[in-house]
Every structure is written in C-alpha cells, then in structure tokens.
Image: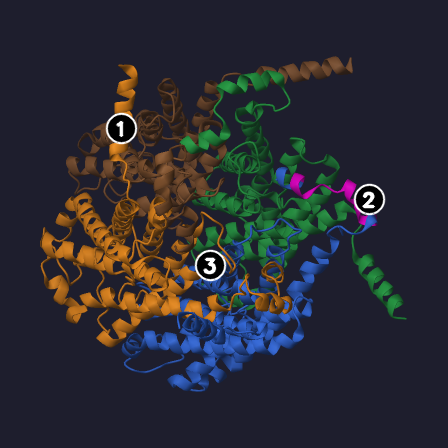
Chain colours: A green, B blue, C brown, D orange
Amino acid sequence: MQPEKGQNAKSFKQRLVLKSSLAKETLSEFLGTFIMIVLGCGSVAQAILSRGHFGGIVTINVGFATAVAMAIYVTGGVSGGHINPAVTFAMCLFGRMKWFKLPFYMGAQFLGAFAGAATLFGIYYDGLMSFAGGKLLIVGENATAHIFATYPAPYLSLANAFADQVVATMFLLMIVFAIFDSRNLGVPRGLEPIVIGLLIIVISCSLGLNSGCAMNPARDLGPRFFTALAGWGFEVFTAGNYFWWIPVVGPLVGASIGGLIYVLVIEIHHPDPDSDFEAEQSEGRPEKYELNVIM
Amino acid sequence: MQPEKGQNAKSFKQRLVLKSSLAKETLSEFLGTFIMIVLGCGSVAQAILSRGHFGGIVTINVGFATAVAMAIYVTGGVSGGHINPAVTFAMCLFGRMKWFKLPFYMGAQFLGAFAGAATLFGIYYDGLMSFAGGKLLIVGENATAHIFATYPAPYLSLANAFADQVVATMFLLMIVFAIFDSRNLGVPRGLEPIVIGLLIIVISCSLGLNSGCAMNPARDLGPRFFTALAGWGFEVFTAGNYFWWIPVVGPLVGASIGGLIYVLVIEIHHPDPDSDFEAEQSEGRPEKYELNVIM
Amino acid sequence: MQPEKGQNAKSFKQRLVLKSSLAKETLSEFLGTFIMIVLGCGSVAQAILSRGHFGGIVTINVGFATAVAMAIYVTGGVSGGHINPAVTFAMCLFGRMKWFKLPFYMGAQFLGAFAGAATLFGIYYDGLMSFAGGKLLIVGENATAHIFATYPAPYLSLANAFADQVVATMFLLMIVFAIFDSRNLGVPRGLEPIVIGLLIIVISCSLGLNSGCAMNPARDLGPRFFTALAGWGFEVFTAGNYFWWIPVVGPLVGASIGGLIYVLVIEIHHPDPDSDFEAEQSEGRPEKYELNVIM
Amino acid sequence: MQPEKGQNAKSFKQRLVLKSSLAKETLSEFLGTFIMIVLGCGSVAQAILSRGHFGGIVTINVGFATAVAMAIYVTGGVSGGHINPAVTFAMCLFGRMKWFKLPFYMGAQFLGAFAGAATLFGIYYDGLMSFAGGKLLIVGENATAHIFATYPAPYLSLANAFADQVVATMFLLMIVFAIFDSRNLGVPRGLEPIVIGLLIIVISCSLGLNSGCAMNPARDLGPRFFTALAGWGFEVFTAGNYFWWIPVVGPLVGASIGGLIYVLVIEIHHPDPDSDFEAEQSEGRPEKYELNVIM
C-alpha cells in the first residue's frame, strides 16, 4: 500500500501543478502586483494615517521602491516580474514577448492591484475609520484616497500632467532596458531587482511632485477602482479634472518612447558578434572591459 | 616537552569545540537574536530617549532591518540565521528542518532576546533613568516600554491587531522563501542578509503603524518579559487589552500561510529537472535567462 | 521577394547603426549627462518646489547620487560613463583615454546637461510658474535658480569656494580611481555605478554645504546657461561674486590632484606582475586575498 | 639617447615605488584614516554648521558609514583597510597580523586623522568663523568641537560611558570577524566595505546616543588634539569629566572582547577540513549550502 499512497500523494501534488506556462506567468503577475500594492501603497498609508509621525517622503519612496524589488524577486524567475502593463506593452512592442500574452499579463496585473488595495484596506481598516471620523475623503487634510491612487498637484494642467507621466515612464523603461542589456555595463545576475528599486527611488524623488509618479496603469487604476467601490465613491474618477486616465495612457506612451530611445541611441550600435564587418571595425573600439577599467 | 605542550594546547582548544551540530546551532541562534535585539531595539531606544533628536522612523526602520542582516551574517552559516521562532516553525512545517530541533532553536531565540534586552537596558541605564525622572513607564509621552516590546496603536481592535501580525508575517515568509528559492530569480550568494534587511525595511515602512510590526515571537516576548522584571511591572502584559499574545501567535499563523502561498503559487510550478514530462513541457516555457533579458 | 525585403530591413537598420566608435561614445555621453540632470536636478526641484514637503537633503543627495548611478548603467558599456568633463580630463591626463576624444566628450556633456535642464524646465513648468507668482528668481526664499546650478553659501569667500571645489573633486577622483583599480580591493563588475552613487552621497553629505558640491563643469555650466536664457537672466553668472567659473575650473584642478594622489600613494606601489624584481620582493608582502581575510 | 631616457624615466618611477611592504601599508592607513575623517566628520560639520537645514542624524550616520566604506575601498587591497587602532589591535591579538606592525599602523592612523581634521577645518574655515561670530566653542548651542571629536551626553556617568564604548566596539569587531569569515555565510568579495558601512550605520543608529559612538581611538583622539591646537583650547580634554580617554581605551577593550566572542561562539566550532574526526562528524551536520537553501 505504501508505494501506492506515495503515487497518490505525487499525483495530488501533480494535479496542483500548472502545466501551462502562461497560467503560471499569469498567476505570478497577479501575486507580484498584489505584493507591490500592499507594501507600496502601505508605505503611503503609514505616512498619511500617522500624519507624518511614522512615515514621510523618505519612507514612502524607499518603501514603494523596495516593494517593487521584492515583487520582482518573487516573480522574476517565472513571469519576468513586469507587474506593470506599461512594461509588458514595451516588451511586446520591442519583440521581447509575444503579443498574445499581453491581455493575460495585463488582466492579472489589474486584478492583483485591486486585490492588493482590498487587502491593504482590511489591514488598515481601524486606522482608516478613526482617521477622519469614519469618513473616506478624497480631498482636504483628512483625505485618504491618495493612499491608493495618485492625484495631481493643484497647480498642474492636464497637458503638463500627461507630459509628466510620459517622461517619467520614458526614463523608467530607458533605464530598465539598460539594466537588462547584457552587452552594456551589466547588473550582476540576481541584483536587477535592487537596481530597479534604486531606479524607482530616484524617479520618485525627482519626478514625483506633479502627480505622484504612478508610471503604471495597473498600480493606479486597480486601487482607484477599489476606492470607488469601497466608500470613497466614483468621484475618485472625476477628481483633478478627470485625471484618472492620465496614469493609464501616459505610461503606455512613455514606455514606448523610452524603449525606443534606448534601442536607437545605445543598443542598436553594439557590435554584432556574428558580423565580419563589425569584427573588423571593433578593433578600433575600446573593449568593454577596458572601458570599465579606465572608467 | 614541546610537542606534548602542543598536544595539550590542541586538546584544550578541542575541548572547547562543540561536537554536536545542534549545540552549535543553538548557541548560534542565541547570539543572533541577542545581536538583533541590542542593535534593533537599540535603534528604537536612541530615537525615544533623544525625543526624536538623534533618531526617528528612518533610523528605527533602517536600524532594525540592518540589525537583522548583521545577525544573519554572524549566524547564517551555522544555524541558518532564523533568529525568529516563526521562521523556524515555517522551516519545520515545510520540511526544511527537522522538528526535534524546534524547541532548541525557539529556546535559544527567547533567551537571546531576553539577554539582548538586559544588555540594552545596561548600556542605556543612565539615559533611561534620566528620561522620566527615574520612572519606567508604559504609557504617556515619557513611556519607554515600547523600546523593548511592541504595543498597539490606540485605534486598533484585537481582531485587526491579530490580522495585522498574520498578514505582515505572511509577507515576510512569502518573500523569504523567494529569496532562498534558487530556481527563481535568485539573490547572489552572500547577499541574502542584505535583501532580507531590505524586506524588513519595506514591511516596517508599510505595515508598521498598527502595532510596530514585531513579526517575531521571541523579539517581542523576550524583551517584554525582561521589562516586566526590570521595573516596568507586569502591566506590560495587560497593556493594550492583553495585546502581548498577538505578536506571539499571529506570526506563527502568518508564517505558515506565507510559506504556503509561495509554495502553491510559485514553487510547486517550477519545472522538475528529473521529470521527462516536464522536460518536454519546458520547451514552450521561456528560459529563466531569457526572461531576465526581456526584463 | 521575402529575402530581399529582409535585406532591405537589415540595411535600413544598418544605416542607423553608427560605424564610428567616437560617434557612439559622444551620443552616449550626451544621453548620460541628460539623464543625470533630469533626475538629479529634478530631485532638487521636487524639494524646492514643494517647499520641503516632498523632499529635503536626504532625497536630494540620494536622488542625485542615484541619478549618476543610473546614467552610468546606461552609458558605462559604451563610453565609460564619465558624464563629467573633470572625469574625462583626468582620464586623458593619466593616459586612460586619448586626448583627441576630449572635446567630443566635453561637448556632448555640456549639450546633454543643457538639454536635461530644458526638459526638466518643461516637466515642472506649471510648478515653476505657480511657485513665485510666475517669476523666476535667483535669490530669496522664492528662488528657483539653484534647482539648476549651484550657488555659494552667504558666508563663503571666493578663495574658500575654489578650495572647496578642488578638494571635493579631489576626493571624487581619488576614490573613483580606487573603485576601478582591479589590483586593489575591487568592486564586483557591474556594481561600480552603485559604489560611485554611494561616493556621491557621502561627498554631498559632507562637503555640500559650502556651495552645493557640483564637482562637474557640465552639470553646473550647462543648466546655468539654460536658466540665463529661460528667464532667470544673466544674473545667474554674476551672482555670488561671479561664482559661476568656480565649479567649472575647480573640478578640473581637483580631478588632476585626486588622480595624482591615488597613483602616487596607492597605485604605483602595486607589485608589477611582469617584473622579476617585484616577484622576489612580493614574497614578503601579504597577499591580497589574505589581507582581506584578516580584514 | 632615446632608450637611455626611457630607462631614466623608468628608474625615476621606480625610485618613487616603495620597496617595503610595511611602508606601503603605513602610507595606505594614513590615507584611509584621512579620507574617513574628512568625509565622516565632514558629514557632522555639514549638519551642525547648517543648524540642521542640510544635514541631520540620517546624513551623519549614512555619511560617516559611507566614508568608512570608501576609505576601505582605497586601502583594503594594500593594508587591509583597518583605519582604526582597535581593529589593528584585535587583528594582532587574534594572530591575523604581526605585532611589530602595530605601532606603524597606529601611528599612521593617528596622523591621518589629525591631517583629516586639519583639512576639514580648512574647507569649512569660513563656515566655522561665521557660525559663532568667530568663536570656536566646546559647549552650548553654538558649539563646534563635536564636529571633530565625540563628547558624552549630559546624563552619562563615566562608568556607563566606558561600558558604552566597550560594548559598541565589541559588536563592531564581532560582526567584522563574521564578515571576513569565509566559512560562515560569506560576503561576496569586493562588497565587504559596503557591509561594513551598513554595520557602522546600525551601530550609530542604535548605540550612538550616549557618546557619539567613536569606537576608534584614532578617529577621536587625532581630531580632538587638532581642535586643542586650532583654537578650541585644551578644554577639549577636560570636557565631560576628562571623557577623552574613554573612546581611546574603551574600543581596545571592546575589540578584544568582540573578537573573542566571535571566535569562541562561532569560529572555533567550524568543522576542520583537515581532521578525519571532523570529517566523520560532519555528515550529521547540515551543509552550508543546504542551510542557505533552507534559510
């Protein structure tokens, strides 16, 4: 009987195992985006709900960036750790992923972000309730909606807001392409998430003032939709002159431009190892190794 | 005579050497938890005793996280650097450690935390005495008990407090499992403590507001027991509606759930290198290396 | 037809590819300096335009340093990631780059910094306009010129200002030389940008008070020239007793001294592997590996 | 003539090259301590002279720690990067360096620290002069002596001060021994300075309140002696009830204890690869690699 029981146990485990690569990747993107929202938006929640006593711009920026890094550690080896429809879109656009996967990735990312917002709402339920006397507000000093989604600064025009999201995501993707370009300087394997975390830190320290630097349609729209349902109301979509679509569309445009700039300015010019023509030319070119030595 | 003296010296050293692997590991866990408490709770002490002039949320979160990282560097190669009964429990539960070691690890962790609290009390004895006119208080603006153990925010219900510890430790273990999963993205060897430190930073920046994010029964109960004896009194156990058991039980539950989620969502689906079936399937699966290249 | 179309596509791509190594490097330095200014000066902008609410000395120093690190990741494998005329000058001076490349590198760095300042101005246009009622000021509490270029502290004499820039850049180059000296301790390949980022952090935390620690003629002069044209007026050159030339000339002097000190005190004494004389001598010298073990 | 000139040039360079290993190491320790003081004490200077506007506990702790890391990158491959007499003393005590080198290392460290203090004084001369109306003060809100050396908190007794320096340095050396113990978890080669920097951060965040956490006789006595000569007067030695000797003697005691604890609790129990007895025993011991996998 013992062996048969072993076989049964094995087959039970095997029944759980996903045969389809796409199913694994979809599940992985869901989990990654979920982690990013709970820990990332959680850093915003801690700063706001404590009115700055247990958090501020440093803990928010470091917290969100590290949340992204941790989500990539959990999902990177399975689905590439995109956790961002703009990243997935750029990967498809530049031929690094097949288009048919795009809707699965994007759907998982939106659902993961929604589920993350709901979980965060649960963990801080008592805190949210006591913060503004039980009210869930979108504007004013007792506002809590910006824990979940981003809202524009009062001075910001829609045109500037759109440019802001395009440019921020452009820098994000341009540098992400560099981080994974093994023919450039090269981040050591296994440390890419840390360097991406640093990248998120610098962008949110420099380009975060206008509208909170979402750079990610799922990160913004999923939690915004949750707040609409959970008690803040559908004014979360009308606030800021219907700002909601800007962190959805802007990042897709910016990611495309950022990828394109990196490819045109840097990647396309790397010497082609298979080409005789390049091999001859490359003698006059300083070697990568040497360049680093001379820095 | 010379050789004999040499032999004696050797045998003296050998007498000190622990033959038993379990004894070494127990000693190692004691030392690791001791280091974590002195340097981690010390970071809280510096912020509180200076009334915010020489510390705050950034130094506390960075300090505690780095204390954990350093404790793992000291103990990781000997006992795995758990320094947390919830981690040890999860390791046993998921078959990564034998159950008979559990009581030794847990005992060492509680004793190490107690000894760390006593040492910290000694180093800051003058500071503690001068802080509140010689009184050791649990509540109010001159309270010092929360240097050692965690206490809940005023708004927090017991149910929310329990959920908070479960969810925080769930994220801790889920991501720790990812960090040590060599078939996922993979942290470079020797850098795991740094990435775990970053993980502690993000969790304490995001989920630390409710009740200080203990996530570790030994880290909380050991120092709490010390404060009960050292002059704060046994009100440290009744405070916050008998809050003390929540950072003891919650983390054990959360660690189990977190480990389970990682295994079910990610680990179980990794292709089995020994299985022919998987080998065939894996052709359709993007390679780990490629995935990293595409982001 | 298919193959021919393929050939056409290939030749179109090949037409974009730069054959000249110098052209690639020039383009790379332009892009790197551009990135550094948008993200680095952007960190200053966020702190100033939010009047400290969304930034301060920590986000500025971490932001600028990480901007440098990211710029090096994008350009390091192509042009060495100098993004600083003082670095390029020192590389030529110590025989690590050919002098004929110097004007191309420097030109690209100044143009990249100018373009970066213009881009940043665009992204924060609404913020700049609302900050001081539409005025672009150089002095006073509503000043914004120091977002782009550096200005001296009120107490600073010109002599002290010059010494400040010389000494700060001296430390920068001295330690950059160490970071790339493979016969010294050695930063792991691919992590040099991170360590350089840390170097920028410590210098701007320690030597940043006098005049903002430019250490880079392009980083300072490019954006200063932009502000002169964009509405702040040519008083940006007369301010601080004609301070503008100090972060241009001082870094060139300091870089030369810093490189010289490193070469004379450390590098020149490394054992020469080709020399029999040295080989004999080196037996008495502790091995690098051993030294690290003994710390 | 050409070849002879070449030979002359070579011999000129060779005349500069230090033949003696000890001379190289002494010079290296001088330069390393010099760097640490300028950038480390510089971080304190920036915070104090700006009255907190351009620095605070975060920039001081990160700045000093990174200054240590950078000094080790410059000197680690030549002299081991001690830059601290307490480290050198422990290295000799535990047989990792020969005693005859001790006075050379210590002398270089004190001189380097003195020279660093003088350089820092020069760079911030205008700032120091304007800070307190030209006065160089040791106590009060306009004090500047603590830029250079450490002073005890008002509440601190001499006994507690001594214990503080002993315990802080004990943790420093205990963990430094772990960082360089290749049979423990192991920091990747070339990243030891970064991990030591993190170690300095956590100790100064947790044990820095009592007396500023010098942990280094040269770092404290060298600059203190400089301030005595430069205008603060010899009250720098009488201040704090003749506190000056505590950061000189305490660290030597603490370093010895810290090294001893690490050796006795961890290092001595590592399995001996040459011993048959151990080889047999080690089968029951979990492998280092496995341990890491199980965390």
* Chain label for disc 3: D
Q: Mark number for residue B71?
A: none
Residue C61 drawn above or below residue D92: above
- What residue does disc 1 label? D11
Q: Between disc 1 and disc 3, whose residue precedes?
A: 1
- What residue does disc 3 label? D181
* Chain label for disc 2: B
Is residue B192 or residue D102 the one in the foreground? Answer: D102
Give the residue type that dot 2 points to: Glu
| Element on which disc 1 rests | helix
Is residue B48 or residue B75 the one in the foreground? Answer: B75
Mark 2 near mark 3, Cβ–Cβ under 8 Å?
no
**Segment tinted magenta in the rendering:** B277-290
Q: Position of residue C25 (x, y in %)?
A: 46, 23
* Chain label for disc 1: D
For residue B154, say whether it is visible. no
Mark 1 near mark 3, Cβ–Cβ under 8 Å?
no
Main secondary structure found in the magenta portion: helix
Distance of label 1 from label 3 (alpha carbons): 41 Å
Residue B283 is inside the magenta segment: yes
Q: Nearer the viewer, mark 2 or mark 1?
A: 1
Distance of label 2 from label 3 (alpha carbons): 43 Å
Is residue B236 or residue A291 the one in the foreground? Answer: A291
Mark 2 near mark 1, Cβ–Cβ under 8 Å?
no
Q: Nearer the viewer, mark 2 or mark 3?
A: 3
Q: Nearer the viewer, mark 1 or mark 3?
A: 1
Residue B95 is inside the magenta segment: no
| Element on which disc 3 rests | loop
